Amino acid sequence: MSLNAALAAGATLVATAFAISTFDRWSRRRTPHEGAWTVSLALFALGSAALWWAESRGWSLASFRVFYAAGAILNVPWLALGTVYLLTGERVGNRVRSVLIGLSGAAAGIVLVAPSEPITDPSEMPKGSELFGAAPRVFAAVGSGVAAVVIIVGAVWSIVRVARDRSPSVAGRSRVIDDRRRHAVANTLIAIGTLVLSASGTLAGRLGQDTAFAVTLLIGITVLFGGFLTASTRRVRSERPTQKFAEMIVG
């Protein structure tokens, strides 16, 4: 197995474990932000698995389309939806979710059926600009960019509000944060993880396209999971591990 395939395999395993954790919480409480996180992390796992497959077997149009849709467009917006739910409440969150479902369907459809150039070298990751027209690339740039800003701004907002003894929610809901330091660390890890996931383009010039995506996926999802583990450290043993995550991360 190549280094890139090993990194992609690690990212797939971490994302899958993270998705199972959030799904467990959502299945018990049916809270909408945890449902959004579960969708996002399942997409992270799917995108990482597509990268793993391509690095092990060679790139094809099918593997690149799955990777591009799940890993470059859809996963971060659904992660940001969890932030929207926590900060603004269900009324606004449900509206954003309805729009996001429509945009997700449109983006997936466009990426999966868009005309493309053939892949000339299966051993190297193709670039979207080399294969696709404008529409898939616009979805990737706008979707992931705007969503990353929502997550990072939401994390900073939450840290500042809690430091001032205020509820991090902007929807008028009162929330009690037991440990401010842990809350700050968890939100900081979320912001850093999001920044890392957005840094593949910067690293591509130094590490190469394949390695940059593999490294950022593995490190980014691991840092995000570190935020979950930090938030899940509790004083009361009877609480479930995901409870603190829901109570502390970005809200």
Image (cartoon, helix red, strand yellow):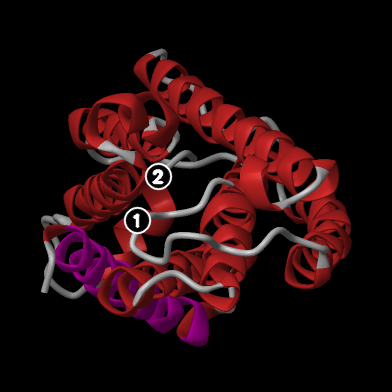
Task: Tell me whether the residue at label 2 lies in contact with that at label 1, contact meaning CB atoms closer than 8 angstroms.
Answer: yes
Name the residue at 81% across, 72% down. 113
- In the image, residue 166 sits, relative to residue 146, either above or below, namely above
Q: Which residues are magenta?
A: 4-27
- Camera-side residue of 122 and 207: 122
How packed mark 2 is, by other alpha carbons closer than 10 Å (few <14, some 14-19, many 20 or more), is many
Quick check: is 14 in the magenta stretch?
Answer: yes
With 43 as the anchor, is 116 left or right in this view? right
Numbered circle sitting on residue 249: 2
- Camera-side residue of 119 and 152: 119
Where is residue 26? Give x, y as percent.
Answer: 50, 77
Name the residue at 47% across, 85% down. 28
How packed mark 1 is, by other alpha carbons closer than 10 Å (few <14, some 14-19, many 20 or more), is many
- In the image, residue 225 sits, relative to residue 1, either above or below, namely above
Q: Secondary structure at mark 2?
A: loop
Q: Secondary structure at mark 1?
A: helix
- Camera-side residue of 134 and 191: 134
- In the image, residue 187 sits, relative to residue 241, either above or below, namely above
Residue 213 visible to the viewer: yes
Numbered circle sitting on residue 111: none
Q: Main secondary structure of the magenta part?
A: helix
- Residue on which disc 1 sits: 245
Where is residue 36? Give x, y as percent.
Answer: 60, 64
For the image, the number of numbered tags is 2
Q: Amino acid at mark 2?
A: Ile
- Residue ranking furthest to the front: 120
Quick check: is 203 in the magenta stretch?
Answer: no
- Within the image, what quadrant is residue 74 found in? bottom right
Name the residue at 59% across, 71% down. 61
